Image: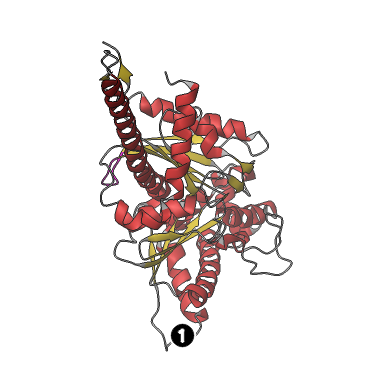
Amino acid sequence: MNTSSERALGGTARNTVLRTIAPRERRSHLSAPRVPTVGIDIGGTKVMAGVVDADGVVLERMRAETPDRSKSARVVEDTIVELVLDLSDRHDVHAVGIGAAGWVDTDRSRVLFAPHLAWRNEPLRDSLAARLAVPIMVDNDANAAAWGEWRFGSGRGADHLVMITLGTGIGGAILEGGRVKRGAYGVAGEFGHMQVVPSGHRCPCGNRGCWEQYSSGNALVREARELAAADSPVAHHILDRVGGRIPEITGPLITELAREGDAMCVELLQDIGQWLGVGLANLAAALDPARFVIGGGVSDADDLLIGPARDAFRRQLTGRGYRPEATIVRAGLGADAGMVGAADLARLVARRFRRANRRRAERRTRTAQRVWARAGQRGTGFDLRLSPRGRTTRP
């Protein structure tokens, strides 16, 4: 078991290592150790955990429900720790990457704010590092998903990429030149909270009319439940499916019925897709990416969602007809994008953490050699030897 001093030294090394990651991400992933790491994707409704190898292959995955947002942040942390320890029983885990649904600071140590969870300036990285004996990496969940798609999914080959994740809300990330763009304060890419309808629906972030209130899983379910509660004739099919229990209407059920041809569910996905296209056109005007990658659970609807999004994007794009258009594609990794990306970013942390440990061992070795040399010059008559870890010992 580590001593408290060793834990403190490891924490300092982790802090130093994490501050150096961003400028080196593009070249470092090529030489990161090919070791298994755990990726954690924390959303508004579920926590996904998986052991991922160096090729982005998920060796084992687990899922837990996200603890209710009214509970303390410690409950979410406990869920993460339980999943990691369970996976560690069967795999040699070298690092853990966390994709958190919230705003993560520039040091990637604290979750400043999470609209759908009880995190307010939460020191997530250090709290988990105190309980897990491996390096911890924390990043925004959409940043992790964008990295995963750029490395292993639909973002490969795109040096200017914007990732949109449609789940409980809308997450976003920007990747340019093989680097995630996090902004001056670490919170770039929060596109879901752009205001698109003044005085519109209230958002959990505290504002009104946010984009995610019109194009997200929550928006999809809200509209379906409102029609069902009004006993609309178009909602009778979905009401029959849930036995009249309106709270059981979910996003996956709406997608399933849309695939079966239910007119209301098809129309709801078209509405969500059109709002998605409007937002993408605005982002194209600001960022001019080559590719938009659409991920998250709502993207399971595929062309029922992305088809209307492409149509609305072309209608709303500034300079349409006189400029190249970004392509809009579904995430190749599907719901695993955030988990795989977080695990791969954690592999970079493992590489630098191992390098920091090696340098500390080399410093201890050099210190011991100097002590031995001085002792020999003074003729003290005792012999200092090096232990396997570079510590000095007497015979």
| Up-down relation of residue 290 to residue 125 (above or below) | below
Residue 286 in the image: state x and y as whole percent: 52, 75
- Could you tell me which residue is drawn at 71 percent across and 62 percent down? 208
Camera sees residue 91: no
Q: Secondary structure at mark 1?
A: loop
Camera sees residue 183: yes
The residue under label 1 is which amino acid type? Arg
Residue 66: image quadrant is: top right
**310 and 263: which one is in front?**
310
**270 and 143: which one is in front?**
143
Residue 59: image quadrant is: top left
Instruction: Please indicate whether residue 171 sits to the left or right of residue 227 in the image.
Output: left
Membership of 57 in magenta stretch: yes
| Up-down relation of residue 263 to residue 372 (above or below) | below
Looking at the rendering, the stretch of residues picked out in magenta corresponds to 53-58
- Could you tell me which residue is drawn at 46 percent across and 54 percent down? 143
Q: Which residue is mark 1?
A: 320
Residue 164 in the image: state x and y as whole percent: 47, 60
- Could you tell me which residue is drawn at 51 percent across and 40 percent down? 46
Q: Residue furthest top?
A: 395
**241 and 374: which one is in front?**
374
Image quadrant for the N terminus? top left
